[in-house]
Image (spheres, rainbow, N blue to C red):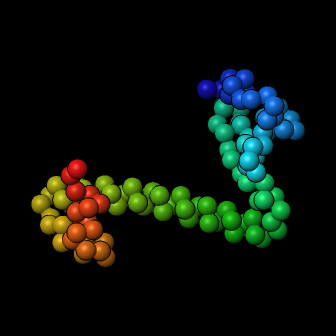
Amino acid sequence: MRKQEVLRELDDERRGPGNDEFETDGVEVTINDDGVAGLRPRSFDRLSPAAQEIAGELMRLAVDRMHLAAEIDRVAVELRAQGASWALIGWCLGTTEGAARQRWGES
């Protein structure tokens, strides 16, 4: 969906300064030309440049953590498919057999 299509769908009453910025519940929403929305709390702008840099680093780490969690899920399932026990999978991840079975076991 392109920017203009997204803008048409958004509530005109929430439109802030400019055509592509909206504020709702303390969050600024911006939309790029491809229609991709970005969210940022208004409080971010009140941070010092150094604090904004640290916040950016924290966000990058959070994204890295999400990617790592997805990769751990994939590898744990693959290891189980290769015949590894839940005890071994739990050991590899620093947890218990029961926790590994609960997390990656068949539902």
Residue 27: x percent and y percent? 73, 49
Above-or-below relation of 36 to 107: above
Decide: is 9 above or below 29. Answer: above
Q: Residue lying furthest right in this view?
A: 17
Residue 89 falls in image quadrant: bottom left
> Residue 78 occupies which quadrant of the picture?
bottom left
36 left or right of 100 in image:
right
Residue at x 47% of width, y 58% of height: 66
On the image, the x and y values in percent for residue 105 come to 22, 56
Residue 78 shows up from this direction? no
Q: How many marks?
A: 0
Q: Quadrant of the N terminus?
A: top right
Whether residue 40 is visible: yes
| In this view, 30 is above or below 67 | above
**Residue 104 appears at what percent x and percent y?**
26, 58
* Image location (x, y in percent) of residue 91: 24, 75
Q: Residue at x 66, y 31 (%)?
A: 34
Q: Residue at x 31, y 54 (%)?
A: 74
